[in-house]
Image (spheres, helix red, strand yellow):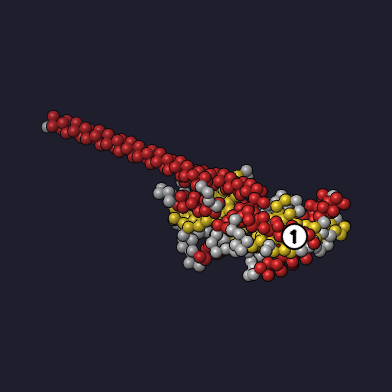
Amino acid sequence: MVLMGGRMNNEYDEYDAIKQDVYQLTRQVREYEAQLDEVKRRSDIQEALIEMLNISLLPLQLNEQMQRILLLVLNIPWLALEKKGCVFLADDTGHGLIMVADHNLNASLLSLCSHIQFGQCLCGKAAETQQLIFRDCVDHDHDIRPEGMKPHGHYNMPIILNNKVLGILNLYVKHGHKSSTLEKNFLEATAAAMANIIERKKTEEQLHALSHKDELTGIANRRQFMQRLNEEINQTDTTFALLFIDLDHFKRVNDNYGHDYGDLILIHVARRAQECLQEADLFARLGGDEFVTLLKDFSSPEQVFDIAKTMIQHLSKPYHIKGKILSIGASIGISLYPQHGTAIEDLLKKADDALYKAKENRGEVVIHT
């Protein structure tokens, strides 16, 4: 009996040892799986950031880029998100946020949150504090509560560059969700990538605007005018008029009073001329005292003539510049598309020829015949 009992004890010891080995192996497997999951998630983060870089290189408007990035983030499998959210960009005042991208938000929320101020609701508070705000439920900081709002939580990630808030990434999470360090790290990396994309896009837009604007008057320059002219000709069933405008007696102002006075007159000319036009029209400065209008909003050549006469009347009124009263005039030559040609060179030449005739008597409007 003693021998049998010893054998049983040995078997129990072996069984306990096997159980301990299985436990250790199971724990090691789980740790290994957790490490693999961690590696996979970090790999997903890197892939997402690379895809954001690819999005930044696409020829898209900034709002479209933000929309694609939002969808990219919402579709990362391991992020416990509600597949809904939005992106805000800072407005021109630097104290407000404008929603530029959204996904699965209802009409009421889109209306209430289209433009919010710093400090308002969670997004505004994240912008004001420049800190990530996480909430696992709807609390007192939710200033905006549309009717029928269901329980949920939020990640509100400020998009910051050089201590300046450029926007907010607003993501929904399930009610009671527990945030993780990896989630926060990912959102911080995403916000940093978005900040660089926003800054780059805004720089591109500023450079584009500068290359298409007249530096003195702020209106369209020759490059923008030629681009628009080409676009109009490439459209089907389009009509427009070209008005070549030359200022009369402008050289006399420059000679008698200096270029400072002449520059101020050109600025006033740009403002006055635009008051005679509609939104669809384009007024541009070609250089010196030469301007051009691409006129879209008219019903007949007679109406084009009348608009040109009105413009001359406006431009010929006295200018009050630095305590002096100065006077100039204007002459206008006109060509019509497609009556006077379908090629840019023909239209420009015919408008210029008409302007030459108009300047023979100064202050005249001549439509090419």
Q: Position of residue 210 (x, y in %)?
A: 66, 48
The amino acid beneath tag 1 is Lys
Could you say which is closer to the camera, residue 132 or residue 53?
A: 53
Q: Which quarter of the rendered picture does the N terminus lie within?
A: top left
Q: Position of residue 70 (x, y in %)?
A: 49, 52
Q: Position of residue 127 (x, y in %)?
A: 60, 52
Judge from the rendering whether residue 306 lies leftward or rightward of residue 280; answer left or right.
Answer: right
Give the class, few, some or many, for how many residues have Cα within 10 Å of label 1's Cα (few <14, many ≥20): some
Residue 335 position by quadrant = bottom right
Could you say which is closer to the camera, residue 90 or residue 245?
A: 245
Judge from the rendering whether residue 72 lies leftward or rightward of residue 214; answer left or right.
Answer: left
Q: Is residue 260 above or below residue 149?
A: above
Residue on which the image places disc 1: 357
Residue 242 position by quadrant = bottom right
Q: Residue at x 85, y 58 (%)?
A: 326
- Does residue 280 appear in this view? no
Judge from the rendering whether residue 358 lies leftward or rightward of residue 28; answer left or right.
Answer: right
Q: Residue at x 77, y 59 (%)?
A: 359
Q: Which quarter of the rendered picture does the C terminus lie within?
A: bottom right
Q: Residue at x 55, y 57 (%)?
A: 234
Q: Position of residue 353 (x, y in %)?
A: 70, 57
| Number of numbered discs | 1
Q: Residue at x 81, y 55 (%)?
A: 250
Residue 8 position by quadrant = top left
Q: Label 1: state its secondary structure.
A: helix
